[in-house]
Image (cartoon, grey):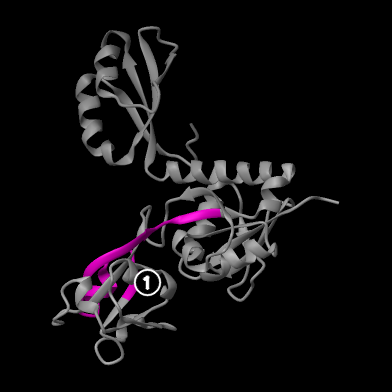
Amino acid sequence: MTKTLKIGLPKGSLQESTFELFKKAGWTIKGSSRSYFPSVDDVELEFMLSRAQEMARYVESGVIDCGLTGTDWVMESGCKVKKVADLVYAKQGLRKVRWVIAVPENSKIKTIKDLQGKRIATELVKFTQKYLKANKVNAQVDFSWGATEAKPPELADAIVELTETGSSLRANRLKIIDTILESNTVVIANPACLNDTWKKEKLDNVILLLKGALAAETKVGLKMNVMKNQLNNILKILPALQTPTIAELANNTWVDVDTVIDEEAVRELLPRLKKAGARGIVEYPLNKVID
């Protein structure tokens, strides 16, 4: 019987980006929008979709061996699980997200101290209560079942809401007065999984490839032909993760130079390389970058 590692994947806003990350890491996940048990082209993996808010509970209880969720929901749950790895990605990019306190643009509430005696709506109830207590603010914190940004001012004086770019808050004429927590996606596991040699090795391998796929998101490969007498000038310009690969060409006066660089540097780097003598420059995308 084939051994399997049961992994929980977040259903909802992170689902699409998580599926894409696994695809780039080497796994193709398939399933209908209504399915909670998508298939994957690896007989040693089983996937279950779950709300990120519930993931830690399922991992703690052993329903699944491990899962991807946010540090925010691990903290909110209070469940005894082990964080195995950080995977910094969100719905719209490779960044952390923030839980912020927001109020209407015309509100007289300017600081967290002004929330004394006020009503706050949020999904992150327990952490918000702890944050307020640490700041010696006594306010009513109500659980919000959704559409939290629409609650002020009639149903709440303020909200604690998750934001990646802040655009939704601005669209609802809300302003941020404080950030109470930064969060990112993490891989969590239970002790039984980590104490099982086969499962831990399988999980470590999955994480290695996921991290490699994330690292590749901001990198590109560059290949170019360079005359040997111009090589030193090119190497002075060229950044690299380690050192560029240099290979002899059929014409022994030229070499091939191959390296990996940050994608954001390409537009300024290519003209400089061309001017320094590089020819046949090719930029290509990467699937994974593993140190």
Q: Position of residue 60 (x, y in %)?
A: 64, 62
Q: Residue furthest bottom?
A: 154
Circle 1 residues within 10 Å: few <14, some 14–19, many ≥20? many
- Asked whether, in this view, residue 215 is left or right of residue 170, the answer is right
Give the magenta-colored segment's residue range: 160-187
- Asked whether, in this view, residue 12 is left or right of residue 58, the answer is left
Q: Which image quadrant for residue 13? A: bottom left
Task: Report the residue at 42% width, 76% height from top.
Answer: 123
Out of 176 and 259, give the one closest to the viewer: 176
- Asked whether, in this view, residue 207 is left or right of residue 285, the answer is right
Out of 141 and 169, give the one closest to the viewer: 141
Q: Is residue 171 magenta?
A: yes
Q: How many marks?
A: 1
Identity of the amino acid at label 1? Thr
- Residue at image mark 1: 128
Q: Position of residue 229 (x, y in %)?
A: 27, 8
Up-down relation of residue 47 to residue 83 (above or below):
below
Task: Report the residue at 17% width, 78% height from top.
Answer: 109
Q: Is residue 165 magenta?
A: yes
Q: Position of residue 132 (x, y in %)?
A: 32, 71
Up-down relation of residue 161 to residue 89 (above or below):
below
